[in-house]
Image (cartoon, rainbow, N blue to C red):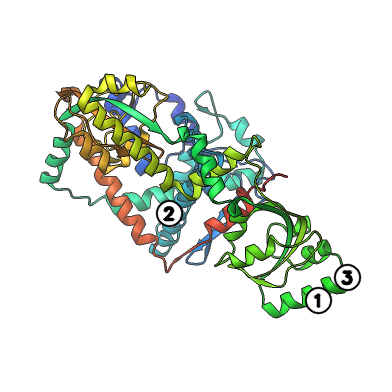
């Protein structure tokens, strides 16, 4: 049943027609919205918390532990909630990175939040932090999953299963404990007046620019194929199966003896003894490139030996980074067909993942040549001669790490993404050291190189400067939270198995196609 306080709060909520929050929203809607943003980031929010459906407690994936407490993912828990939020943020941002990079960002970010949350639960428990059942009731009434048209629905509450209600209540209780823990830590926050003045000075001037962008997606096909020709072995591929033994080399040797004696099939022994994601498929790894197999070894020699295997032939027991492995050749090695449609994509993907510096060097050289030409002939003429489309930016201040969320470094043309500029000290140093109409040197961002021309400078509008105190309060709170996170996530307390779990359960390494 609902607790007495739960029912009382529900009835009281119906009667309330105007709150302090409503007044703040009406008197200054922008500051109200900004304060909500701060609250969402620094203190846990309950809005949008999903109801936990029946059967959702299965399918647990362990990513590590904090002081022995597991850090797990399963549908409906805190880790899951953070993953869904980050995935939605990435979708709205329109990121154009490949699927693996996007998935890694989302899951790693959710893991980091889950580690922080788990650490606070452990530390709060040891400190005796506690929240009452009445407070949990209030949170569920005001922002839980049992609301309908903004009001608590007793029908929705009663229609949920007992297990679902229990799991949802547990999640809300943990979030309230985390909120209380953060409030206790930050209640004595002190900041420096000089630091606040420096912060406001960063906001005081804004600039807008014209820029030329050299995106890495434009890396020439001729350069890609030239790299493939110079590294033929690296892009050879072979179809293999493997058995990975983690216990000892002797145990792996016993398995190899059984294989040679043909007492059992390779597939049967893989399912019985192998300790990796391919075991349930009888050890089948599919087609693997040389460079992919190379990741498992300290030197290239074992991979060179594997690629010489004939169809059906077994390798000896080989020591890898993860244990002792026996490979079977399922189809003999072949070289990359550079005339095949997928060849350029295969090599380009490899370059972007493992040899990105080569791509960066190429575009740095192209962009620096453009900068020299622009200083001689003018920015627009240089764009015309090199068939580039100049891009204009909005006004923005020295907004390193996007401290001022309303004024990021942003291009007017959405096809040019400057989101990574916010995390580049080189970008802001180059942009704010220019004189009017001056041309910058090439500036490297994550996936492009840009050249800037200063078009205009102005004083920041007064309505934005008036927000400096709120901005600084948020910034200082974020700094304190980062410090707290560093303390809580001491390596002695944290067991981080994220990469192993991610590449085993979430994004297994793709197989090269025949």
Residue 344, image quadrant: top right
Mark 1, mark 2: which one is toward the viewer? 1
Which quadrant would the C terminus be assigned to in this image?
top right
Q: Is 228 situated left or right of 442 in this image?
A: right
Q: Is residue 14 above or below residue 333?
A: above
Query: Reading the chain from its start, which is encountered first: label 1 or label 3?
Result: 1
Residue 214 horizontal/vertical position (percent): 38, 32
Which quadrant would the N terminus be assigned to in this image?
top right
> Which of these two is toward me, 127 or 484?
484
Q: Is 415 situated left or right of 472 in this image?
A: right
Residue 504 horizontal/vertical position (percent): 63, 54
Where residue 257 is drawn, which disc sits there? Answer: 1
Kind of element beneath mark 2: helix
Residue 337 horizontal/vertical position (percent): 66, 42
Residue underneath mark 3 = 262
Residue underneath mark 2 = 116
> Which of these two is toward me, 144 or 154?
144
Is mark 3 in CB contact (under 8 Å) with mark 2? no
Residue 176 horizontal/vertical position (percent): 43, 47
Is mark 1 in CB contact (under 8 Å) with mark 3? no
* Residue lying at 35% horizontally and 23% vertically, measured from the top left: 18
How far apart in space, not on screen, are marks 3 and 2 (Cα)? 51 Å
């Amino acid at each position: 049943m609902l607790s007495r306080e739960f029912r009382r709060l529900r009835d009281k909520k119906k009667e309330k027609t105007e709150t302090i929050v409503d007044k703040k929203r009406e008197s200054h809607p922008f500051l109200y919205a900004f304060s909500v943003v701060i609250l969402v980031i620094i203190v846990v929010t309950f809005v949008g918390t999903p109801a936990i459906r029946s059967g959702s407690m299965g399918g647990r994936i362990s990513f590590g532990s904090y002081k022995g407490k597991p850090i797990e993912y399963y549908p409906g828990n805190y880790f899951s909630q953070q993953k869904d939020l980050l995935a939605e943020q990435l979708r709205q941002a329109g990121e154009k990175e490949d699927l693996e990079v996007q998935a890694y960002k989302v899951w790693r970010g959710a893991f980091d939040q889950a580690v922080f949350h788990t650490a606070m639960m452990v530390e709060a428990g040891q400190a005796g932090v506690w929240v009452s059942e009445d407070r949990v009731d209030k949170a569920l009434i005001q922002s839980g999953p049992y609301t309908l048209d903004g009001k608590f629905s007793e029908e929705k509450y009663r229609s949920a299963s007992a297990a679902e209600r229990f799991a949802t209540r547990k999640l809300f209780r943990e979030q309230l404990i985390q909120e209380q823990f953060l409030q206790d830590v930050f209640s004595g926050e002190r900041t420096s007046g000089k630091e606040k003045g420096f912060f406001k000075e960063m906001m005081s001037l804004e600039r807008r620019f014209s820029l030329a962008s050299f995106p890495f997606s434009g890396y020439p096909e001729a350069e890609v194929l030239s790299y493939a020709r110079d590294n033929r072995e690296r892009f050879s591929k072979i179809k293999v199966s493997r058995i990975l033994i983690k216990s000892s080399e002797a145990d792996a040797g016993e398995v190899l003896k059984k294989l040679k004696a043909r007492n059992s099939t390779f597939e049967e022994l893989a399912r019985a003894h192998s300790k990796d994601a391919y075991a349930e498929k009888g050890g089948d790894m599919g087609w693997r490139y040389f460079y992919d197999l190379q990741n498992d070894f300290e030197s290239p020699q074992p991979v060179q030996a594997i690629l010489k295997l004939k169809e059906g032939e077994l390798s000896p027991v080989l020591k890898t980074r993860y244990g002792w492995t026996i490979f079977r050749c399922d189809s003999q090695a072949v070289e990359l067909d550079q005339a095949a449609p997928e060849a350029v994509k295969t090599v380009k993907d490899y370059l972007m993942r493992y040899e990105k510096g080569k791509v960066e060097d190429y575009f740095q050289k192209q962009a620096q040549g453009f900068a020299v030409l622009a200083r001689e002939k003018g920015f627009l003429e240089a764009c015309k001669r090199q068939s580039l489309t100049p891009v204009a930016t909005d006004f923005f201040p020295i907004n390193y790490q996007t401290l001022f969320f309303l004024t990021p470094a942003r291009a007017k043309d959405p096809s040019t993404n400057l989101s990574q500029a916010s995390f580049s000290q080189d970008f802001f140093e180059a942009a704010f050291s220019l004189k009017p109409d001056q041309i910058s040197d090439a500036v490297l961002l994550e996936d492009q190189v840009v050249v800037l021309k200063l078009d205009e400078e102005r004083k920041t509008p007064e309505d934005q400067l008036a927000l400096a105190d709120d901005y600084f309060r948020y910034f200082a709170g974020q700094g304190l939270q980062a410090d707290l996170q560093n303390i809580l996530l001491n390596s002695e307390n944290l067991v981080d198995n994220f990469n192993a779990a991610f590449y085993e359960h979430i994004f297994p390494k793709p197989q090269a196609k025949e």
